[in-house]
Image: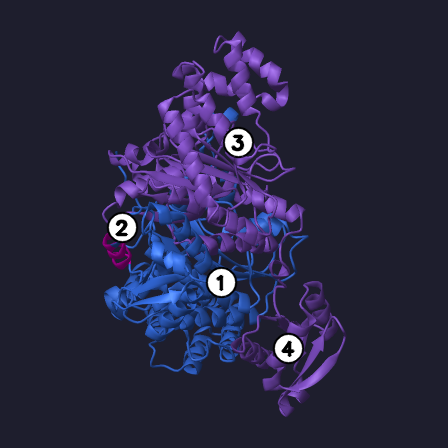
Chain colours: A blue, B purple
Amino acid sequence: MNTHPARGMRDFLPDDVRRRQYVIGVIADVYQHYGFEPLETPAVENIETLMGKYGEEGDRLIFRILKRGEEGKTGEADLALRYDLTVPLARVVAEYQAQLPKFFKRYQVQPVWRADRPQKGRFREFYQCDVDAIGSTSLVVEAELLGAAADVLHRLGFSNFKIRLNHRKALSGLLDAAGIASDRHGDALVALDKLDKVGREGVAGELVTRGLVDSAAAEALVTLFATGDDVSGGEVLERLRRDMHGHERGEAAVGELAEIVRLTEAGSAHGLVQVDPSLARGLSYYTGAIFEIAVPDLAGSLGGGGRYDELVGMFLGRQVPACGISLGLERILVVMTERGMFPDETAARPADVMVTIWNADATADAIRLAGELRRDGLRVDVYPEADKIGKQFKYADARGIRFVTILGEQESAQGVVAVKNLTTGEQQVLPRDAVAAHITDRRRNDG
Amino acid sequence: MNTHPARGMRDFLPDDVRRRQYVIGVIADVYQHYGFEPLETPAVENIETLMGKYGEEGDRLIFRILKRGEEGKTGEADLALRYDLTVPLARVVAEYQAQLPKFFKRYQVQPVWRADRPQKGRFREFYQCDVDAIGSTSLVVEAELLGAAADVLHRLGFSNFKIRLNHRKALSGLLDAAGIASDRHGDALVALDKLDKVGREGVAGELVTRGLVDSAAAEALVTLFATGDDVSGGEVLERLRRDMHGHERGEAAVGELAEIVRLTEAGSAHGLVQVDPSLARGLSYYTGAIFEIAVPDLAGSLGGGGRYDELVGMFLGRQVPACGISLGLERILVVMTERGMFPDETAARPADVMVTIWNADATADAIRLAGELRRDGLRVDVYPEADKIGKQFKYADARGIRFVTILGEQESAQGVVAVKNLTTGEQQVLPRDAVAAHITDRRRNDG
């Protein structure tokens, strides 16, 4: 019988789960300190809720579920697996608008499923960690979201990351100002996205060849998009503003970018935000600021997001402003594992102490001792069988459990317990009610 | 557009999530103190992994997922949604046997999906909380499992529950001894299960009419199955042993029951275990002790489980003993909600303090103040807009946030912050670096 997990899916053994829970715990704790509240939605949604929200390619990658039970007909699907956390959020906001606060701030850490071709580091089931603020167009929202994300990454031990910032309306303003018709903006962005691969001249050439712009405008666009880290933030904004050539919405967007930079400087993301005129981000629902978190020497990003003021309206029938950021849990875990960034506590031993069973007659007393030690706060495993004591020691040692207790007839009669430290070999006989304190004390001192 | 969750599925708004996480946190904490480690498996399994494990009815209720991506053909399903946590555990034990400890003790808290007809308190997506010990036939396993479950329920505030205990081989021994052929044991149990509905004479009559036993044997069975709480544990075991009429495996099973009772008396389940000869439990994979946790005045159970020494063998090809117990999270939540058993901390306010924005110019300083208060450990919301201050206060109050800060030009210049307690109306001007301590102090004193 095949015992592998299904293709593109993973089992998480105890060490994996502890590492994942550590990261999720930090994320949840930081977000709570920013006033975000937890939300959970079902893994399964009505198929109509999801279709048409993620583009054609997205629709194709949605896992569909066959009708079941009394209503089942062959081959018909009416349900689908959650594809991201943003569309369910928009549905929730529409459904519970009367109960939710005006400014609904939620975080959500749950798995999503995509029928992508599995490959290294890419799975069909993976977690998303989303944080979104609904109900305000204020740029305080962007600044707080970026501050929270920076706090999460700092707490996890990341230091040299940058937050790339751009604005959808700055992007379209620029392309408008360069004389590119809106229905060809997509083509222009595809060409501009090749800067790293084909270089400035290659891209400028393609823009002209495709009949998108004349060569002067192409040169200006390419120059702006290729602006490097060596140019100051103020200078980037200046160049952006200049290249708008008076385009009104574009200039307003540059003003928003400047304000977001100013506000983030007051929070935990200070010094980390770089306005990057070339940042585009794929999803079509963004309407304002967009951002992406990048670590040098790491392909891809640790997270990204932006403002999407029109998505909730697809469910609610009236526009509700929204902005969010999604951290890539799987990617964060990969990087932290490769770089040894997990604190010792996540490599937790399965128990603080293992209670051995001296012989069959001593079994009930071993269980009783385990209960006493647990009441004193210890994590206690009980070896289940009255095997030879050496075999029991070996098992504890192999499992990384440092202390074992021995409770034979003699100890039982005298109200004492022998405690052996498997690391040092040291063995001590202690009054029964002093055992927990002894182990706690040794654990603290030995680190 | 329909914005309800799919049929039988639920959205969990922040208060729901906090309550659920509180219960799951207690369960995980207690299990960790018993030496159990966390495991997570994918929501989606290969369809062959699940089929044929849950009986005909179970197979029908499994949600199937259509093939997707390049391999998709119309109507074909190769994947299915997790139906319980036991079969995935058996698969995991078979797959990773070389990496897992000899006595693998895991807990797992994850959702499962069943295409059941939704009804009050019954959902198509619901959480299971399973704890299982693999690799030992020792009855220490049963005793520790029952002790852990009792500890969980005590910690959650349940006091008057009982653990019903029986043994599959005692049950079959009894029916054998009564002269019922093994292929008719199921029929006999169905008849015996109607004791509450049709009474002792009704059941005895049915057993005879169906040709299962003669009237003397029927009388004996019914008497034993109807044994009430007024009979002592020792007496129940005595009657069970007597009715085995020398049936060897049945008597051995009674011996195991006696030993489990003796060992549980040494742990946290002492005084809670009642041997109940009528307990059958549906699932066919049980091979030894079976148990169920019952609360008086509550239909159904809070959890149940048993020993299943042959299930892992279906995946591994050789037998590996196993025993587990599953707590009913959804049911526990319903009862705790109805009975007001949640501690105050789960009704958490969304933040400890809300920072208001005096006017647009004061925005960056408000964000800076929020960061300072967060560094001092407070959960801080920032009102996102420079609305009239009274409107901002009203919002904080409506959200249950007790403190607000006011930081105008004057305060900013003097390095002070005004802090208003919305419950008492009291307002104090404090040095900026004394704000967090003030709020922490007031929160502690006001409860």
- Tell me whether circle 4 and circle 2 mark residues in contact (CB < 8 Å): no
Q: CA distance from mark 1 to mark 4?
A: 24 Å
Q: Which range of residues does the magenta coloring cover? A: A390-399
**What x and y, as percent, mark residue B151?**
51, 51
Q: Nearer the viewer, mark 1 or mark 4?
A: 4
Placement of the C terminus of chain B among the 4 image quadrants: bottom right
**What x and y, as percent, mark residue B104?**
32, 48
The residue that mark 2 highlights is A119
Please report, as a chain letter, where disc 1 is located.
A
The residue that mark 3 highlights is B235
Element type where label 4 sits in the image = helix
- Tell me whether circle 3 and circle 4 mark residues in contact (CB < 8 Å): no
The residue that mark 1 highlights is A28
Q: Nearer the viewer, mark 2 or mark 1?
A: 1
In magenta stretch: residue B418: no
Residue at left offset 63%, top offset 21% = B197
Q: Nearer the viewer, mark 3 or mark 1?
A: 3
Element type where label 3 sits in the image = helix
Whether discs 4 and 2 lie on one chain: the answer is: no
Please report, as a chain letter, where disc 4 is located.
B
Q: Main secondary structure of the magenta part?
A: helix
Badge 3 or badge 4: first in the primary sequence? 3
